[in-house]
Image (cartoon, rainbow, N blue to C red):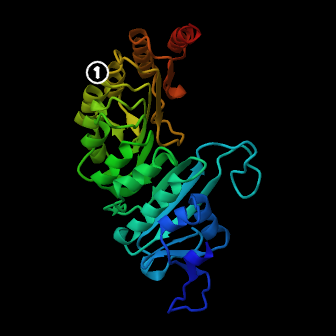
Amino acid sequence: MAELFTPKQLEDDPEEDWHFYLTGSFADLATKGGWTFEELFAYVDEDGRVAWTGDECCVLPTDMDPPEHHESYTITMMIEDAVVMSGADGDDDGNDKDKPKKRKLSITAPNSEHAASTIEGIFLLCARNQTPLNVAFKLFATNPRQKFPTVSKEAMQAAVGDGIQSLSFQFCALDQTTIQAVSEKIGDLELRQSVVDGGWEASLSSESSAISTLKLSCTQPEFVKIIPSLGSSQKVETLELLLHFWLQGDWFRQFCNDALKSSKSKIKSLTISYLDINDDGWSMLLESLHHHPTLETLDLCFTEKFVDTFRRLDAERRTKRTEAVLKLVEANATIKTIVWPDFQQDAEIMKDVTAKLEQRILK
């Protein structure tokens, strides 16, 4: 495949001999050369090359500096094998047996438009990969968020679901074309501090949505936009929320009433990480799950793991919170596991909670 890459001399530094230009196309790499994503990664990373995949876009190892006019727009692509091969090394030191193989690449360009064809080509190569991949795309954490390149629905859906098993967008601004194309094929989707232009309704609530595992980390205003879609989704079975704010107020009541009490909800596992929650919010959250038809696992924890005294409740508040947990277990027979901070529990009441849950697991 050497004929598809030719040396590229930089006008400002002609002595840099590790720049190569893709003279063909990603389709040529796939069809003529039989390349998958693994060959692209090896070509760039193992030999420390900068592969120019367009006039204004290049793929390079993450430990190399981008071209000067690319410094403001870099997509970091993080990849790991979705299937762990026995005896495979997770890292270069050879000590991580039976762990997913992890690697990174940078895609740099002046802006998202110049990077679009390269991202589309990478999706094409991922679709041909022999081992399914878990892929994350990360942009700089700017406000407003930088735009993720718009990729054709055909190219994205060819990769997602087969070559790509799970997909994560981090600090990205996504358009409707991207999120709809992804939602129709991917089973495991994470949006970390990303925004979706135009809302979520057409994606999560659609009958064509394939998303069964959804992981969300976002600001409170962005989360409010998502609540209606969470209530209308009939496919999501695992929901993980990483929320760096208090669970309280009208928006939280809306989440409990419209999302958790929804008759359409098929959630089996619910994880909520939060900055904090007051007593009224705790009661409202647990009561909203009393009649949830499918919930089996509930995990409530703090996003901040520091040791403090502020969240160490007095005996009366520990009793009230644990009584609310006991009422939930008694009201909802589908629940088998509840996890929440030990230091906020009443030990005596938790004996009853644990006994009831253990009986269900043994049946």
Judge from the rendering whether residue 344 lies leftward or rightward of residue 7; answer left or right: left
The answer to whether any part of residue 87 appears in the image is yes
Judge from the rendering whether residue 121 lies leftward or rightward of residue 99; answer left or right: left
Where does the image place residue 220, in percent across and percent down from the top left? 31, 45
- The answer to whether 306 is drawn above or below residue 110 in the figure is above
Judge by depth and name the residue closer to the eye, 196 or 256: 196
Where does the image place residue 89, in percent across and percent down from the top left? 72, 51
Q: Secondary structure at mark 1?
A: loop
- The answer to whether 42 is drawn above or below residue 348 in the figure is below
Q: Which residue is mark 1?
A: 263
Q: Residue 211's quadrant in the figure?
A: top left
Judge by depth and name the residue closer to the eye, 82 or 95: 82
- The answer to whether 165 is drawn above or below residue 77 in the figure is above
- The answer to whether 272 is drawn above or below residue 350 in the figure is below
Where does the image place residue 138, in percent across and percent down from the top left? 46, 58
Please give the count of numbered marks on the rendered protein: 1
In which quadrant is the N terminus drawn?
bottom right
Where does the image place residue 122, in percent across and percent down from the top left? 49, 61
Query: Residue visible at 46% across and 34% down?
Result: 311
Residue sitting farthest toward the front: 32
Q: Amino acid at mark 1?
A: Ser
Judge by depth and name the residue closer to the eye, 7 or 303: 7
Query: Residue visible at 40% across and 19% down?
Result: 294
The answer to whether any part of residue 139 appears in the image is no
Query: Residue visible at 31% across and 32% down?
Result: 233
In which quadrant is the C terminus drawn?
top right
For label 1, count other residues whose C-alpha is less than 10 Å away and answer few (under 14), some (14-19) or many (20+). Answer: some
